[in-house]
């Protein structure tokens, strides 16, 4: 259970509870459930959204988890937790770990690990930022429906700034640049994307932070938009695909690409404070070795 409260000051005197719920970012999707569960309170008493408020009152919403994620079984896998409070959990995901369970990855995912961590309470696995299986770095998980709704809107509006480290197979001509190219799904593939004039708008910014003797480099990359495989598609588009990228570059047996989400900047869904989370690349990975 999570209780979030709003103290009424003079400027809100005479308004209705429903007006305050809007200011608390309660979405139209969440409101019916709050009504059904008796989760709308005025000074601790269950009320309707039409109830009038006055200076000194407290409007609260109570968020209940009525059940846990049924299709994500708890598995005892360690988590690298970098931040946690009542509303969000942020972890650094290792390589070769899917975020979601699937037919071929039933109990070895981040979801399984998170469900084990919260095994003694009702919990729904709600990842907000998602990474490919071979991409390492920060993943944010919302711990309740309100934080999930607000953070999902932040993602949709491009308000969560993501910065990655990428190991590129070739050094771009410019040390700092922008790639502005629309991305579309390949018609014959469920997974693969391509640059296409009929695709969705996509913008990526990059900066080379280390040039290597073999012509490769390490780049700091920020996807301003959030298209599937955006960094991989855009770097391949300028002739600098990620090293070992089997989809958009050259596949090398036994090797996987090196892409790491090193930092996230966003506004906390409830406190509205700015958060900057960071996570260094795995010490035993090629990225760390090349950077040293």
Image (cartoon, helix red, strand yellow):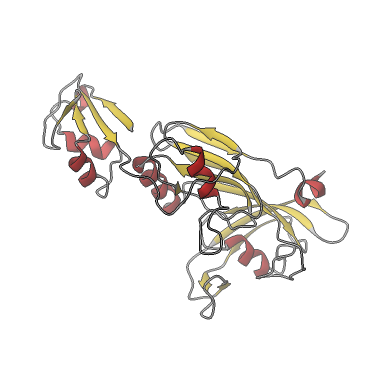
**For the N terminus, which image quadrant?**
top left
Q: Residue at x 53, y 57 (%)?
A: 106
- Give left or right: position of 170 versus 19: right
Up-down: is 204 above or below 125?
Answer: below
**Which of the 4 image quarters holds residue 144?**
top left
Give the left or right position of residue 210, taking residue 79 as reference. right
Q: Residue furthest right?
A: 213
User: Relative to 192, is 54 above or below?
Assistant: above
Q: Nearer the viewer, residue 284 or 111?
A: 111
Nearest to the observer: residue 175 or residue 158: 158
Q: Quadrant of the C terminus?
A: top right
What number of labels is visible? 0
Residue 120 quadrant: top left
Q: Relative to 51, does residue 135 appear above or below in the rendering?
A: below
Whole-percent x, y for residue 89 in the image: 49, 38
- Residue for point 40% across, 31% down: 271
Q: Position of residue 231 (x, y in %)?
A: 61, 60
Residue reaching furthest to the top: 56
Is residue 138 or residue 81 the one in the foreground? 81
The picture places residue 125, in percent across and down from the top left corner, at 44, 47
Q: Residue, x 72% and y 65% (percent of image)?
A: 240
Left or right: residue 203 versus residue 291 is left
In the rendering, at what x and y percent does residue 291 appear?
79, 46
């Amino acid at each position: 259970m999570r209780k979030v409260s709003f103290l009424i000051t003079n400027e809100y005197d005479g308004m209705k509870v429903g007006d305050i719920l809007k200011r608390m970012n309660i979405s139209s999707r969440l409101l019916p459930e709050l009504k059904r569960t008796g989760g709308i309170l005025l000074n601790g008493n269950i009320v309707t959204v039409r109830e009038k408020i006055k200076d000194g009152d407290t409007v609260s919403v109570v968020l209940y988890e009525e059940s846990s994620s049924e299709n994500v079984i708890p598995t005892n896998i360690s988590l690298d937790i970098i931040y946690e409070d009542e509303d969000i959990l942020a972890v650094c995901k290792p390589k070769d770990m899917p975020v979601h369970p699937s037919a071929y990855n039933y109990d070895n995912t981040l979801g399984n690990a998170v469900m084990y961590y919260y095994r003694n309470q009702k919990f729904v696995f709600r990842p907000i930022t998602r990474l490919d299986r071979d991409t390492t770095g920060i993943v944010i998980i919302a711990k309740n429906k309100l934080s999930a709704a607000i953070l999902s809107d932040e993602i949709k509006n491009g308000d969560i700034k993501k910065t990655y480290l990428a190991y590129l197979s070739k050094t771009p001509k410019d040390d700092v640049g922008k790639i502005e190219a629309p991305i579309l799904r390949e018609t014959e593939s469920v997974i693969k994307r391509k640059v296409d004039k009929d695709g969705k708008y996509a913008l990526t910014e990059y900066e080379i932070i280390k040039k290597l003797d073999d012509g490769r480099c390490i780049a700091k990359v920020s996807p301003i938009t959030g298209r599937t495989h955006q960094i991989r598609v855009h770097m391949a588009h300028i002739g600098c695909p990620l090293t070992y990228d089997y989809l958009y570059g050259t596949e090398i047996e036994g090797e996987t690409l090196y892409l790491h989400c090193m930092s996230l900047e966003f506004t906390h869904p409830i406190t509205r404070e700015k958060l900057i989370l960071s996570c260094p690349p795995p010490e035993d990975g090629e990225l760390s070795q090349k950077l040293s």
